[in-house]
Image (spheres, rainbow, N blue to C red):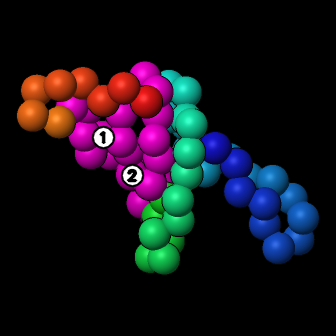
Amino acid sequence: MLRREQDGEWRTIGNTGGRPLGLRADGAGGVWIADSIRGLLHLSGAGEMTVVATDIAGSPLNL
């Protein structure tokens, strides 16, 4: 994942290790990510990637 800085340069901020389909900033410096391979992820403002969910009630997320 890349972020465009104010100076116009692109900076790598994370890698899901999967296939991200959608992103949503959380307002606290983090990003929520829907990934077709890994599920629902959260990238913190500090750069820590966390898998939040891979299934719901035992059924895999089909993203």
Q: Is residue 62 above or below residue 33?
A: above
46 part of magenta stretch: yes
30 part of magenta stretch: no
SS for tag 1?
strand
Q: Which residue is mark 2?
A: 42
Where, quadrant-wise, is the C terminus in this rendering?
top left
Is residue 17 something that shows in the picture? Answer: no
Q: Is residue 26 above or below residue 36?
A: below
SS for tag 2?
strand
Q: Assess disc 1: are there few (<14), some (14-19) or many (≥20) residues with their C-alpha within 10 Å of its C-alpha.
A: some
From the top left corner, tell me how far across and down residue 37 is, in percent: 43, 23
Amino acid at the residue labelled 1: Val
From the top left corner, tell me how far across and down residue 48 is, in percent: 40, 51
Q: Residue at x 36, y 33 (%)?
A: 39
Name, please, the residue furthest toward the left.
57
Q: Which residue is mark 1?
A: 51
